Image (spheres, grey):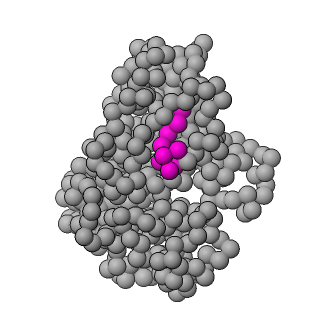
Amino acid sequence: MIINKKIRVGILGATGMVGQRFISLLENHPWFEVVSVAASPQSAGKKYSEVMNGRWNMKTLIPEKVRDIIIKAVEKDFDEIAKEADLIFSAIDLDKEKIKEIEERYAAAGVAVVSNNSAHRWTEDVPMVIPEINPHHLSLIDIQRKNRGWKKGLLVVKPNCSLQSYLPVVYALKEFKPKYVFVTTLQAISGAGKTFESWPEIADNCIPFIKGEEEKTEKEPMKIWGAGCPDISATCIRVPISDGHMASVAVKFEKKPLPEEIINAIENFKNPLSGLELPSAPEKFIHYLSEDDRPQTKLERDYENGMGITCGRFRGDKNLDWKFVALSHNTIRGAAGGAILIAELLYKKGYLK
């Protein structure tokens, strides 16, 4: 798909880990172009490259088109940012009520807001979307606009990064009616906005608590899946890995599938994005690995440019039915990449103009 004029993009929270990932992923995007970056008042008024000197954590260089953009303040420069951008990706790190206020203000000004934050995930008229699972929930935007009197603006959120590894695999097996899911997530430090240099305490260490993560991991699937969502119990652990969230999962089904039925359901998952030609969509969303020692974080986190899910080690469970291991890239599929994919779908559906 070729467009005559690119959608102008602003990024709120552009200096953080997820903000950096947005900038990196959007460098050569065929539909979207970064024209505005915003952060805290302390960074405002300076060139992006100046502020990010020694702080840029991506493997690629800061894009040339972004290096000299002057950073704006998220709130103080609201009018200017709202005028410059058609689409905003929100990755700001503030308290929830302040985030709600800021995101709603931009949407009310006619800007499409796709948020990586948790603040609006349980707002009734705000869709929370994994495009390959519940793209139809975007129709809620029509109700949202009617409720709020927004003619052009909109607000959509993506779910927590911890869901991305295991939920797509369980959803691919929905024909067998999964009833109970027990999941332990092993989550990378980039999910906390950290590197090994900025968080030396994590070396040779695991931390068995991530504030708020288990509640999100257990509850957010209910809004995405809807009726028939299994009952989920989660334990979330921070591990000394740079990128990539792994999940160890055990499932009880109403109709226990055979091994070949599991593999067939995963390998032949009907992706609702097929044929839409979205630039960030993986060619194959979920990939089953038959080797005993896969998936591995280093080997699989960049599968499908970080937008795909890998899984393996399917084996019987003496207390439930089946258990498996799955993996996703937390700052690509689980954060910036997932949000960009939502925006691409919004554009394809005519919500971005």
Q: Residue furthest front?
A: 2
**Is residue 50 placed above or below 150 in the rendered structure?**
below
**Is residue 173 placed above or below 110 in the rendered structure?**
above
Looking at this view, is 211 or 61 the one in front?
61
Report the quarter where the N terminus lies: bottom left
Q: Left or right of 197: which side holds 191?
A: left
Q: Could you tell me residue 141's position as x and y percent?
A: 25, 54
Can residue 96 be seen by looking at this rendering? yes
Asked if the stretch drawn in magenta spans residue 183, the answer is no
Q: Could you tell me residue 140's position as x and y percent?
A: 25, 50
Residue visible at 43% across and 28% down in the picture: 266
Q: Could you tell me residue 79's position as x and y percent?
A: 35, 81
Can residue 216 be seen by looking at this rendering? no
Report the quarter where the C terminus lies: bottom left
Looking at this view, is 73 or 212 the one in front?
73
Asked if the stretch drawn in magenta spans residue 310, the answer is yes
**Is residue 165 placed above or below 10 in the rendered structure?**
above
Q: Quadrant of residue 295?
A: top right
Q: Quadrant of residue 146?
A: bottom left
Residue visible at 48% across and 46% down in the picture: 304
Residue visible at 38% across and 28% down in the picture: 268
Q: Could you tell me residue 110's position as x and y percent?
A: 27, 70
Looking at this view, is 240 or 137 the one in front?
240
Number of labels in the image equals 0
Residue visible at 42% across and 46% down in the picture: 282
Q: Left or right of 318: which side holds 79?
A: left
Which residues lie in the magenta part? 303-311
